[in-house]
Image (tube, grey):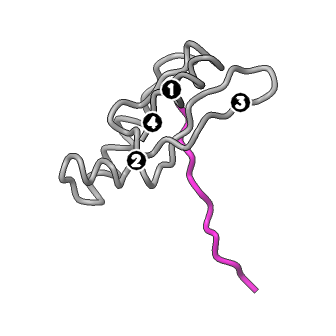
Amino acid sequence: MLSDEERARLSEANPDALVADGLEAAYVGYASQHGSLPLAVYDADRCIEALMQESEMTCEEATEWFYFNVVSAYCGQGTPLFLFPSDQTETT
């Protein structure tokens, strides 16, 4: 859950950073790159889980909705980032 304290830290770092409403449980923090302002970061897998729980969607429905309506949405320079974790399985 995106707490008031986390929201305040993000706003202090970048007052124009946007948050993804309804996906607070997937918030992991904020990130920045040299020369750019920090942006909110969300875990994509947790976003899909949140959509499934809140909207009673199947995994397939939530995934499709997430990519079409969230990842593809550009709301200006404050648009959040979505983290797609790599496979953590080791190969030998």
Residue type, mark 3 in image? Ser
Question: Which residue matches tag 3?
Answer: 32
Q: Quadrant of the N terminus?
A: top left
Question: Pointer 1: what residue?
Answer: 7
Proximity of marks 1 and 2: CB atoms separated by less than 8 Å: no
Q: CA distance from mark 2 to mark 4?
A: 13 Å
x and y percentages locating residue 8 in the rendered image: 54, 22
- Per the image, label 1 sits on a secondary structure element best described as helix
Mark closer to the chain start, 1 or 3: 1
| Residue 87 within the magenta-colored segment of the rendering | yes
Q: Is 4 on the left-hand or right-hand side of 53?
A: right
Residue 70 found in image quarter: top left
Residue pointed to by mark 2: 47
Q: Amino acid at mark 1?
A: Arg
Say what amino acid the circle numbered 2 marks. Cys
- The Cα–Cα distance between marks 1 and 2, rounded to whole angstroms, is 18 Å
Query: Which amino acid, mark 4?
Result: Leu
Q: Residue furthest top?
A: 15
Label ID, residue 2: 4
Q: Secondary structure at mark 2?
A: helix
Q: Secondary structure at mark 4?
A: loop
**Distance from the alpha carbon under mark 4 to that under mark 1:** 7 Å
In the image, the segment drawn in magenta is: 80-92
Residue drawn at 43 percent across, 52 percent down: 46
Q: Is the Cβ of the residue at disc 4 closer than 8 Å to that at disc 1?
A: yes
* Vertical relation: 43 (above or below) 58: above
